[in-house]
């Protein structure tokens, strides 16, 4: 074994090559802030040093972090390259080969579970923490978004390089557990420590979204945009959040302009970017805007990039797009493909994703009663679909609009009251917590 070097956070790498370590640390730092382009930094190092096990694993994790089924083969090739050199691997690397191997073969839940054990043994492995955190989001593990980070947080101190990134993840986990005051304080502190932490910026944006603080959210995102609006993997998603703030502030024109400027697909868009585009167009459609030409362009793109059966969240957004573009037949084919998805017996993303996709297809074709029938039972049970509360709020908004179009006044009132109470309650809670803290 040739473990002689350590990464920027103290984790051992089975290499003696300082140039490989330098490329690894540089790529990892970019990845922590979702800044571009860690792949371009790491790829030449792997070409030069094909036995660099940790390098192959970092590449695999970054590819898997795109949550794009069409890229699983690429991730598996990276894990295979690491495994081919496992004779030189240390215990940490062998553990990661197991976790990322399971995920790259389509079993994200098993990969997530193995990463959980790995992090118990390696609480300062910030790379592993970041990809486990991301998989918690797409598995709908809201509590683990907070609690997995908490398991590691005590092993970090403010003097440690990378501490801000841990705080940023913790901030997002707190937000997804509705602890908004702590989330906002933690997220703002993380951005103070590391202004290019686009994930921490995003955590504070989520707090503003969930509390209905559109003006605060717009101010926050504009004040921090030097850290996320360009050369950043979070650029599309944070622009999506900014567009939601504009909708919340009643300015749908500004939201549509942001779609055209920063959310609409570009050649390199991955599935997550396409999801944001679909979700924003859907919300604008619910607002009464005619965006049919954009739906056509987006549906054409999604149809060629679809990787049915890998990720229910992605598939639901693709079905929604095909249906909104007027191609109900293609949407039905997508729903049929979702029905054949193979998955871990304890993963329930398809139990939500399939009826949700059918409900959105029903809405797009004017079958509002059918949409209501499918969506109402999902509203308080949608977490296994994955994604954030803000992303799954699309289902709630669709249900209200379906009820309105179906003339179901009782349901409009009930869902509207529920929504208003939640936002008022979160604002009141934030004020109370701030008063206690003061
Ligand atoms: Fe988000």
Image (spheres, rainbow, N blue to C red):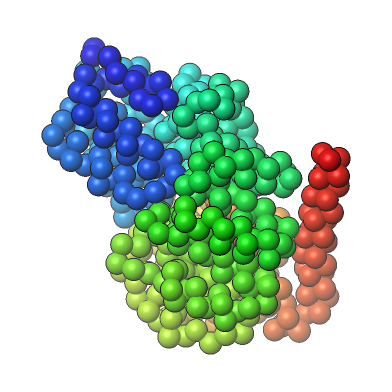
Horizontal side of 346 relative to 271 (left or right) equals right
Percent x, y of residue 211: 73, 58
Q: In which quadrant of the rendered image does the N terminus lie?
A: top left
Image quadrant holding the C terminus, namely top right
Residue at 62% from the left image edge and 33% from the top image edge? 147
**Residue, x 33% and y 64% (percent of image)?**
305
Would residue 353 be visible to someone looking at this image? no
User: In front: 145, or 373?
Assistant: 145
Kindly tell me whether residue 164 is visible in this rendering.
yes
Residue shown at 60%/23% (left/top)? 154
Q: Residue at x 33, y 32 (%)?
A: 25
Which of the 4 image quarters holds residue 193?
A: top right
x, y percent for residue 346: 54, 40
Where 148 falls versus 364 (above or below)? above
* Residue lying farthest to the left in this orientation: 48
Count of numbered labels shown in the rendering: 0
Q: Residue 402 location in percent, x, y?
A: 67, 77
Nearest the eye: 90 or 400: 90
For residue 32, above or below residue 390? above
Expressed as whole percent of the image width and height from the top left, the position of residue 172 reads 60, 45
Question: Relative to residue 279, is residue 57 drawn left or right?
Answer: left
Residue at the limit of the structure toward the top, as seen here: 1
Quadrant of residue 303 in the image?
bottom left
| Left or right: 25, with 360 as reference point | left
């Amino acid at each position: 074994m040739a473990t002689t070097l350590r990464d920027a956070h103290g984790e051992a790498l089975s290499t003696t090559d300082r140039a490989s370590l330098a490329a690894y640390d540089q790529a990892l730092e970019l990845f922590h802030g979702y800044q571009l382009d860690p792949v371009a930094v790491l790829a030449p190092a792997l070409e030069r040093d094909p036995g660099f096990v940790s390098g192959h694993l970092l590449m695999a994790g970054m590819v898997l972090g795109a949550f794009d089924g069409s890229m699983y083969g690429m991730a598996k090739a990276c894990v295979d390259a690491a495994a081919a050199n496992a004779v030189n691997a240390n215990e940490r690397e062998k553990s990661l080969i197991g976790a990322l191997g399971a995920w790259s073969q389509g079993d994200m839940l098993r990969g997530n579970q193995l990463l959980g054990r790995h992090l118990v043994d390696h609480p300062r492995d910030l790379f592993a923490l970041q990809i486990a955190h991301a998989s918690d989001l797409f598995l709908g593990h809201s509590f683990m978004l907070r609690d997995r980070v908490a398991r590691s947080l005590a092993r970090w101190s403010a003097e440690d390089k990378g501490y801000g990134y841990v705080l940023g993840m913790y901030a997002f986990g707190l937000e997804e557990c509705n602890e908004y005051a702590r989330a906002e304080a933690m997220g703002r502190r993380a951005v103070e420590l590391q202004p290019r932490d686009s994930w921490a910026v995003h955590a504070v944006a989520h707090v503003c979204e969930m509390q209905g603080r559109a003006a605060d959210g717009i101010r926050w995102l504009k004040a921090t945009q030097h850290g996320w609006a360009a050369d950043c993997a979070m650029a599309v998603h944070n622009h999506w959040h900014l567009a939601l703030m504009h909708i919340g502030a009643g300015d749908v024109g500004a939201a549509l302009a942001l779609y055209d400027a920063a959310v609409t697909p570009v050649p390199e868009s991955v599935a997550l970017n396409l999801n944001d585009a679909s979700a924003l167009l859907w919300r604008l459609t619910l607002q009464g805007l005619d965006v049919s030409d954009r739906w056509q362009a987006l549906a054409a793109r999604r149809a060629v990039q679809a990787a049915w059966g890998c990720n229910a969240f992605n598939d639901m957004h693709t079905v929604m797009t095909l249906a909104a573009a007027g191609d109900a037949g293609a949407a039905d084919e997508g729903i049929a493909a979702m029905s054949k998805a193979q998955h871990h017996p304890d993963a329930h993303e398809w139990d939500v994703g399939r009826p949700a996709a059918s409900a959105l297809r029903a809405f797009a074709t004017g079958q509002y009663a059918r949409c209501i029938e499918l969506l109402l039972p999902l509203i308080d049970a949608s977490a296994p679909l994955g994604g954030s509360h803000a992303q799954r709020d699309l289902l709630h908004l669709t249900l209200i609009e379906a009820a309105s179009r179906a003339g179901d006044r009782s349901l409009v009132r009930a869902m509207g009251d529920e929504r208003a109470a939640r936002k008022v309650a979160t604002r009141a809670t934030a004020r109370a917590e701030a008063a206690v803290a003061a």
